Image (cartoon, rainbow, N blue to C red):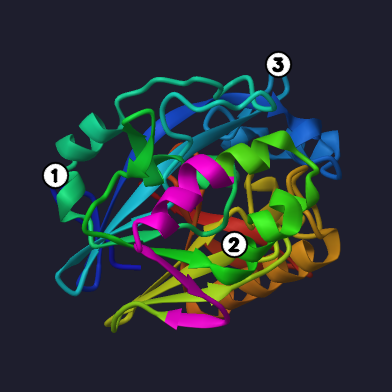
Amino acid sequence: MNTNESKQGILLGEVEINRVVEWQGAFAPARTLVPDAQAELWKDSEAWLAPDHWEPGSDRAVLALQTWIVRSAGRTVLIDTGVGNGRERPGSPQFHQRQGDFLGDLARAGVRPQEVDIVVNTHIHGDHVGWNTVAADGGWTPAFPNAQYLIPAADDAYFGPDNGYGKGLREDDRLIYEDSIAPVHRAGQAVLWEGVHRIDEHLTLESAPGHTPGSSVLRLRSGSERAVFAGDLLHSPVQILEPSCNSCFCLDAEAAAASRRRILERACDEGELLIPAHFAGAGAVEVRRAGGGFTAGRWIP
Ligand SMILES: [Zn+2]
């Protein structure tokens, strides 16, 4: 993988990638986040899991909430938009009424809101759609006034009002839809897609269901370079080692594991750099086959 470091981030072919980290830290007990990953799996890989992905002392998984900035074919694309500011999230105390300087950090990375052309929500969970909107006039309005927002149709249907906002299972899901998705629809900026959606000659969205009904990945191809923004197909590198292990947030266990394995297999076969939503530290890693499974190769900062 030829990753020329640029001032802004890395270049893959003609596509430049940068990121803004909204939050990073010890998120939850390792066994809570990835219930089926045994203690030995973490311990045996401590040398490279700690400190970026695991805090051995507290046995907590370390995650990042981050937005990938992708400049491709003359346009600026944001992949996932974090938790946002000032959100009512009773089910998620860590991010309830959070205040941070995400838009300032985005500006320091060279992106002003009006310059964003496309926002990709890999799926509709609260940590992927928050900065879709900002507070305005006692309500919420799109944060990126000129952007098209690409939202998986299956998630929009599942988490939308016609399905009781995710079958009414979590109050947070209703709040998330109402403050981060509905305003984008009202502004006429939402584009729902299913199956495969080509953004430009380098970028293609592809459905990879299981974590949520509409969970998706974004594939990048430019020249000989390949990458896959894998969203929440993986939360921790231990899931590279044991792809059958789901996170506690995966809604359909069987489908989530199948999508994870499919994406990892293809990443190996086609030499795609793996860029999940929540990997802290370098954030991107090469994947290699090992026995019947996979292992992490070189990390790309
Ligand atoms: Zn997430």
- Determine contact: label 2, label 1, CB under 8 Å: no
- SS state under label 2: helix
Is residue 187 located in the magenta-colored stretch of the structure?
yes
Q: Amino acid at mark 3?
A: Ser
Which range is magenta? Answer: 177-197
Q: Residues within 10 Å of mark 2 (few under 14, many from 20)?
A: many
Which badge, 2 or 1, is on the more N-terminal residue?
1
- Residue 102 point in image, percent of width and height: 31, 32
Indicate whether 72 appears above or below 96. Answer: below
Indicate whether 10 appears above or below 278. Answer: below
Question: In front: mark 2 or mark 1?
Answer: 2
- Is residue 82 rendered to the left or right of residue 168? left
Q: Residue at 60%, 27% (x, y): give it.
A: 89
Q: Residue at 49%, 71% (x, y): give it.
A: 192
**Badge 1 residue CB within 8 Å of ligand 1:** no
For the N terminus, the image quarter is: bottom left
Indicate whether 88 appears above or below 260. Answer: above
- SS state under label 1: loop
Q: Which residue is mark 2?
A: 156
Q: Is residue 255 visible?
A: yes
Q: Which residue is mark 3?
A: 58
Indicate whether 12 appears above or below 187. Answer: below
Gap between marks 2 and 3 measured at Cα = 37 Å
- Is residue 236 rendered to the left or right of residue 107? right
Q: Which residue is mark 1?
A: 110
Q: Amino acid at mark 1?
A: Gly
Q: Nearer the viewer, residue 26 or 203?
A: 203
Q: Amino acid at mark 2?
A: Asp
Q: Nearer the viewer, residue 123 or 222?
A: 123
